[in-house]
Amino acid sequence: MPRTERHLVRDYMTRAVTTLTVDARLIDAALLIRRTGKRHVPVVSAEGKAIGIISDRDVSRLAPSVLSPMNPEEYNKIFEGTPITLAMTKDPITVMPDAPVQQAVHIMNERKISSVLVTESSGKLVGIITVTDVLRLLDQMLSGE
């Protein structure tokens, strides 16, 4: 790809984003992350607005230690009883689909995060751009595509 061409977030983001709603529980996030292999799951309102993001690290951070003296039922009760809103990062950093990819890269680099949610001006979630997505672009650029 020629360097003069503008690389926009919408051309590299993942559009089919698996999300959780604000009323989800920690168990929902844990199962979804395990099932899909996704490391970041956006949390949306009933209207589809991005209100948070939960990561595999957030789930691990709130999970009881496997060394704790509790039985599996007690362990599961914690996951089932913990609202996702306690574990998620609220007011996630977002970019617009027409933003340059460089803006998303800058945010990820500065904030030491590996994904940025993509929203319309209304806050409606339309995608996610991750380090993997920008590495794909870097690979294309370095190979001269």
Image: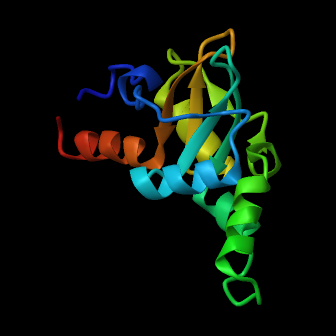
The image shows residue 79 at horizontal and vertical percentages of 70, 60
* 30 versus 16 height, above or below: below
Residue at horizontal 63 percent and vertical 18 percent from the top: 48
The image shows residue 6 at horizontal and vertical percentages of 39, 20
Residue at horizontal 37 percent and vertical 30 percent from the top: 12
The image shows residue 133 at horizontal and vertical percentages of 39, 41
The image shows residue 47 at horizontal and vertical percentages of 67, 14
Q: Quadrant of residue 134?
A: top left
* 40 versus 22 height, above or below: below
Q: Nearer the viewer, residue 20 or 81?
A: 81
On the rendered image, what quadrant is the C terminus found in? top left
The residue sitting at the right extreme is 86
Q: Nearer the viewer, residue 107 or 144?
A: 107
Q: Is residue 113 visible?
A: no
Q: Is residue 73 left or right of residue 125?
A: right
Total marks placed? 0
Q: Nearer the viewer, residue 44 or 66?
A: 66
Residue at horizontal 66 percent and vertical 10 percent from the top: 121
On the rendered image, what quadrant is the N terminus found in? top left
Residue at horizontal 27 percent and vertical 39 percent from the top: 141
Q: Nearer the viewer, residue 24 or 71?
A: 71
Q: How is the image coloured?
A: rainbow
The residue sitting at the front extreme is 73
Q: Is residue 11 visible?
A: yes
